[in-house]
């Protein structure tokens, strides 16, 4: 990926894309997660891996995308601080947030704390500077029957394509066969399903922070994950958070 589009791994399933020249330059966030643990419900884990970009720096962005409502993808505190940071910069009217409908509904009940957010819909394309972000279906419905889990296909003016998959287990409809970068959680079956549909030049593995007590499925051994991915995608250049 050229400097015209930089991919920063923020930790857990968080990704930041920075690209475009001059007025077109934009910073996009996907599923930033800065909490020290806690996954809601019965699960409570302590996060051992520190986020890779400092929080104060990560808060400064033009747009925030959330793939689904799980607590490690929609970090409520980060969301509101993202807006507070924009207000402090005098940019609260410029920043945008794209959320699954159920998350958007929830945020709208706290309207005093933030300006508008936009509900994602499958197939919609959002233009942000030289980036185009297309929301793809990631197989999940909310209680109202609306799609609640998304993947994001990002393309830029150079024709680069990046698929940010969230907690994907299936390749989404509409994903191109030829991809510049596939950002994916390295489980065997999902990787095999993707290998039948897409041919990425680069695979960035993510969603593998370490948590305590330690039997949690989010704990990923990166050398093993790289080997597994290499077996399934022998031609791809594989990047892990440890590289
Ligand atoms: Zn999830
Ligand atoms: Zn997740």
Image (cartoon, rainbow, N blue to C red):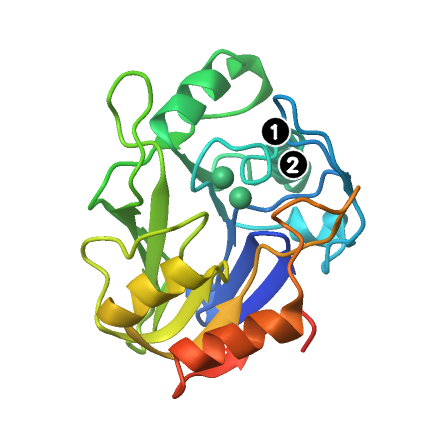
Residue indicated by mark 2: 78
Along the viewing direction, whichever of 56 and 189 lies nearer the viewer: 189
Picture residue at 74% right of the left edge, 48% below the top: 55
Q: Is residue 152 visible?
A: yes
| Location of residue 210 in the rendering, given as x and y in whole percent from the top left corner | 73, 53
Relative to 74, residue 218 above or below: below
Q: Which mark is residue 52?
A: none
Residue 232: image quadrant is bottom left
Relative to 110, residue 212 above or below: below
Question: Dot 1: what SS?
Answer: helix
**Is 92 on the left or on the right of 123, as rendered?**
right
Picture residue at 61% right of the left edge, 72% below the top: 224
Residue 100: image quadrant is top left
Q: Is residue 5 visible?
A: no
Along the viewing direction, whichever of 86 and 162 lies nearer the viewer: 162
Q: Residue furthest top?
A: 109
**Is 52 on the left or on the right of 193, as rendered?**
right
Separation of marks 1 and 2 at Cα, in angstroms? 5 Å
Relative to 104, residue 213 above or below: below
Is mark 1 in CB contact (under 8 Å) with mark 2?
yes
Picture residue at 71% right of the left edge, 31% below the top: 38
Relative to 98, residue 228 above or below: below
| Location of residue 44 in the rendering, given as x and y in whole percent from the top left corner | 72, 30
Q: How many marks?
A: 2
Q: Residue furthest bottom?
A: 235
* Quadrant in which the C terminus is drawn: bottom right
Q: Which mark is residue 76?
A: 1
């Amino acid at each position: 990926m050229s400097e015209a589009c930089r991919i920063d791994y923020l930790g857990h399933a968080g990704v930041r894309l920075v690209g475009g020249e001059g007025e077109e330059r934009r910073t996009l966030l996907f599923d930033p997660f800065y909490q020290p643990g806690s996954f809601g419900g019965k699960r409570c884990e302590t996060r051992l891996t520190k986020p890779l970009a400092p929080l104060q720096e990560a808060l400064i962005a033009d747009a925030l995308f959330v793939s689904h409502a799980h607590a490690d993808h929609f970090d409520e505190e980060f969301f509101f601080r993202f807006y507070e940071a924009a207000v402090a910069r005098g940019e609260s009217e410029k920043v945008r947030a794209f959320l699954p409908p159920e998350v958007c509904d929830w945020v709208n009940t706290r309207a005093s704390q933030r300006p508008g957010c936009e509900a994602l819909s499958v197939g919609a394309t959002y233009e942000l500077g030289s980036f185009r972000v297309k929301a793809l279906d990631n197989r999940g419905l909310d209680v109202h029957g609306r799609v609640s889990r998304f993947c994001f296909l990002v393309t830029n003016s150079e024709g680069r394509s990046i698929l940010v998959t969230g907690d994907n287990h299936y390749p989404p409809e509409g994903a191109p066969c030829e991809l510049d970068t596939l950002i994916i959680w390295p489980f065997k079956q999902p990787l095999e399903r993707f290998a039948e549909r897409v041919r990425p030049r680069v695979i960035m593995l993510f969603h593998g922070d370490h948590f305590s007590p330690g039997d949690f499925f989010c704990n990923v051994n990166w050398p093993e994950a790289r080997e597994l991915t290499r077996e399934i995608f022998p031609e791809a250049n594989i990047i892990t958070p440890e590289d």
